[in-house]
Amino acid sequence: MTDDFHKPVRRPSETFDRLFAAVDPAEVSRAAHSTAAALLSRVRHEQDPDAVDRLVAFTSRHGIDDIAELWSRSPAKTLPGSLWRLYLVQLSIHDDPATAALLYDRGRVELHSSDAVVAGAPVPAGPTELVALIDTILRGAFQGDFAVALDRAAAFCRVQASGATHLADDYELTESHRASELTTRALRLSTYADDLAASAKLWRRDSLT
């Protein structure tokens, strides 16, 4: 029997609140905005499927740190902030697709809205399908309508947030620590959903910079 070994990546839970020191925060901000704009513009202009595939697979190969150092401190409703959130959502699914599928399926049942339709996952959606979905959403950010990709990611986060909230209720009496973790995750996902949806509106007004 052989095992497949992959380069370890930093878990999303360890990077959400990570801060990076900077001698000149203004310079860091300018670099974040310029690199995000240049990356998006170049990939869209060249229309190279291989380049898009490399960007979608970037965190799987290199971890999250390189991207974090560029974009993690950017405000939520900016281009680098939006790209950072898209990558974090993607990494959270790749890191634990089984839990992601569990949360998504529970949220799909409990959430009485069109979010599951907007996100676009098949029914039922297992771990493999969720990984494919989040990769498709990120791919759409680089080669499709950026606002649509942000809206799909926001809807995806809302479905998962609903699932995490209801699972937290299930665990409350028997595993309070697990319930607390799920509640924290639900709050984070809900916040990301709001941020991504707001960024989609700004993009449509040519105001996301």
Image: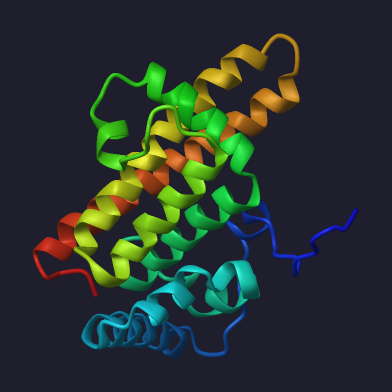
Nearer to the camera, 50 or 203: 50
- The answer to whether residue 169 of the structure is visible from this angle is yes
- What residue is shown at x 63% (from left), y 64% (from top)? 18
Question: Does residue 15 lie above or below 132 as drawn?
Answer: below
Residue 112 at x, y = what percent? Answer: 29, 19
- The answer to whether residue 78 of the structure is visible from this angle is no
- What residue is shown at x 61% (from left), y 67% (from top)? 60
Question: Does residue 7 lie above or below 167 as drawn?
Answer: below
- What residue is shown at x 74% (from left), y 26% (from top)? 177
- What residue is shown at x 79% (from left), y 61% (from top)? 4
Question: Does residue 24 lie above or below 135 as drawn?
Answer: below
Q: Quadrant of residue 7?
A: bottom right
Residue 120 at x, y = what percent? Answer: 31, 41
Quick one: quadrant of the C terminus? bottom left
Nearer to the camera, 124 or 209: 124
State left or right for residue 150 relative to residue 138.
left
